[in-house]
Structure formats: structure tokens, C-alpha cells
Amino acid sequence: MENFHQHAEEFSQRYLDGLAQADLEGILGLFMPAAQVQSPLYGKVAANVFYRDLFSDTQSSVVQLKDVLTNEENLSACLFFSYSWTLASGSKVEFEVVDYLKFNRNGLIEFLQIIYDTRHSRQAYEGLN
């Protein structure tokens, strides 16, 4: 993939915009159809299941990108951002996140792992069910 770092930076902004807007179609267009997401709260699931459930559990989200780190050799990137999440219940949690993205040769995400401290978000999330 030509100019992988630039692709990852542009891709990251599209991803975070879709996350903040709960744009299911837009988010899923960034993933391979068989892509998996590993989340501290939702476990390892298909991307379409993860984002459908996340957006169903969300009233609003505000994200702010802090950094993008790339590894062209591995076709991977890490996004570091702050996430202010208001759950469907009205509970609000804020935390910093690292998303590890593994791309395929066509520039789509084949795997995403979400890494953050769930100390505050787990209780709010479990209150939804």
C-alpha cells in the first residue's frame, strides 16, 4: 500500500468521525466483511455485531484524536484518543483509548483491538442490562 502512514491518518479520522456520529454503515465500510473486534466490554465479536451493539448502547460519543502510530511493515496502526461516552441509560464515562488496527492489503481493517481501563465504564455498561 502506497503511503501507508497517510492512509492510516486519514482512515483514523474517518473511523473516529463514524464512531462519534454512530454511523453504522460508514464504520462498517472501513472493515472487511469478516473482520473481528476485541473489546474489553463486549468480548471478541464480528465488527458488524460489535458496532450495532455499541451504537444501541450509546446516547452520544465525543472523541478527540491525540496520536496515530503506524507500522507499515505489519500494515497496522494504533490510534490514541479520548472518548467521552454517554450510554443509553444517561450514564457518562470518560477515558483514554488505544485502538490497534490491523489492515489488509486493500486498506480495510481485518482486526481491531480496543485497549482501555474499564474501571469506570464497566459499572455503567453493566447497568444497561
Image (cartoon, grey):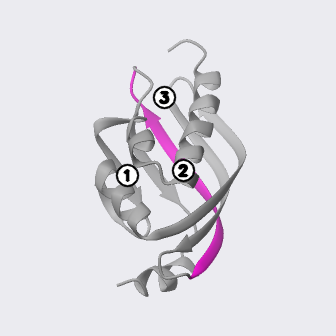
Residue on which disc 2 sits? 99
Secondary structure of the residue carrying numbered label 1 = strand
Residue named by callout 1: 37
Horizontal side of 20 relative to 106 (left or right) equals right
Give the position of the C terminus as an image quadrant: bottom left
Q: Residue at x 57, y 65 (%)?
A: 60
Mark 3, residue position? 74
Q: Is residue 88 left or right of residue 60?
A: left
Q: Residue at x 44, y 40 (%)?
A: 26
95 or 69, which lies in front?
95
Amino acid at pointer 3:
Asn
Q: With respect to residue 104, does 86 lie above or below?
A: below
Q: Residues within 10 Å of mark 2 (few under 14, many from 20)?
A: many
Q: Is residue 55 left or right of residue 10?
A: left
Q: Amino acid at mark 1?
A: Val
Q: Which is more N-terminal, label 2 or label 1? A: 1
Label 3 – label 1 distance at C-alpha: 18 Å
Magenta residues (range): 91-105
Looking at the rendered structure, which numbered label has been put on residue 100?
A: none
